[in-house]
Image (tube, coloured by chain):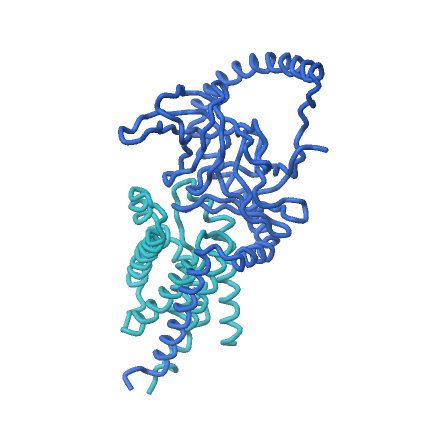
Amino acid sequence: MKSFLKFAHFLFVLICVIIQISFIEHLRIFFISIDLILVVVIAVALFDGGVYGIFYGFLAGLLLDLVTSKIVGVNALIYSLIGYLTFKIKELGLKKTILNYIILIFFFSEIDILLYSGIYYLFSLQSSSAKLALEMIINPVCNILIMFLVFPLIKAGTVKKEEIGFVYKD
Amino acid sequence: MAFKNGNFKNLIVLLVIVVLCVIIITISFKQSNIFQSLRTVSLDFLNPIQEKVYSFFNPLLKFFLSIKNYIDLNQKIELLEKENASLLKDYAENINLKIENNALRKLIGLEIRKDYDTVPAKVIGYYDSKWQSEIIINVGKTSGVYEGMAVVNEKGLIGIIIASAEKSSQVRLLTDPQSSIGARILSSRKLGVVEGGIDKLAYLNYIKISEDVFKGDVLITAGLNDLIPEGILIGRVSKISIIPTSPYKKIVVDLFADFKEVEYVLVIKGLKK
């Protein structure tokens, strides 16, 4: 059951990559900027574990890079780092409250934008600071809204044992 | 041991992946052929699913677009009415000129202009970030579509094919910061280069300060490249400014094709045989 769930989550990540390319990118026309993959990677790292967060982040980022990006590997690197950092924060004792999740999504959305811009800047690709500032406001808000859709889907079936006290009981 | 077993495993996995990513980024930045072929493989792999997903969400996108269009409907109608009147006049003139041109070409032994051989395609993906503007279309090498070919719609040039897989291709739009197309000002026949900017606008570059360019001038492709035929409409000059430190004018181009609404396109394969 557990491995089936992980496989289902892997398929879900793949579907999210396709939805990101085929649909969500179009929404930029209406100034809506959503990073669905980022939200899914954070959810996987929180509910499935660090290794899955890192690995799925890498695969999703690589696929996105191959289909869309100028430099292959940038998204793969950022998403796997975010997968790991999310798990580390959870390990430090993050309480499972909606407010904490919102802060987490906000924080990583900003980190994602800054890292992406930073890497592109290192490769001497120009960037518009006005657009960057606008994205740093819109993207986290949209990601937080999408979180309410994605988190319950990933969470379903993964935390039942934990809640009834089998996992952490000494 | 400071690390818990699980933490150590995570850290090792992360380190391996970070090293792998750094290698991938380095190879990719050197524009290696490995990634070009990997790109085409992933485009082929995603093509059927992507097409279905795009069709599924298309009504929703159209709905959003129609709301956006509805807001500036009156202004659009006024502009279109003006443009229509001017186009009708030009059309009548053009028909006469075409007949006259063909007759003169025959007279001096020149070949009469041929139509282009095109392949219709559907847009199945769109990617627009600060550094790139690209679309993915559902035709590829099996339909005779290759890198460098021009992509147009009824309004004018859309972009250039930059990667071609078996059944899908990646198109770099004119607003992409890496896009660069030879252009000619229709009225003065002067040559320049239409390039994309990071602000998602297109610019006509390399026009000297001493050269005359006017707001409203129409730009067409220069035909300097074998794969991009001459005379395809690009856009209209919308703003001209002079930068004191530059020997060239800064010219903003209002593109004819609206990339936000592009659904079907044509890929120009060459002249009809």
- Residue A149, above or below B262: below
Front residue of B146/B199: it is B146
Q: Residue at x 53, y 64 (%)?
A: A11
Pinpoint residue A123: horizontal percent, then vertical percent: 36, 53
Question: In the displayed structure, does residue A154 sit left or right of residue B11?
Answer: right
**Shown colour of chain B:** blue
**Quadrant of the image containing the C terminus of chain A:** bottom left
Front residue of B193/A7: it is B193
The picture quadrant where one finds residue B12 is bottom left
- Residue B193, above or below B12: above
Front residue of B273/B174: it is B273
Pinpoint residue B240: horizontal percent, then vertical percent: 35, 24
Among all residues in the image, which is located at the extreme front? B108
Question: In the displayed structure, does residue A9 sit left or right of residue B106?
Answer: left
Chain appearing in cyan on the rendered image? A
- Residue B40, above or below A49: above
Q: Residue at x 51, y 54 (%)?
A: A67
The picture quadrant where one finds residue B97 is top right
Pinpoint residue B59: horizontal percent, then vertical percent: 54, 42
Q: Residue at x 31, y 58 (%)?
A: A111
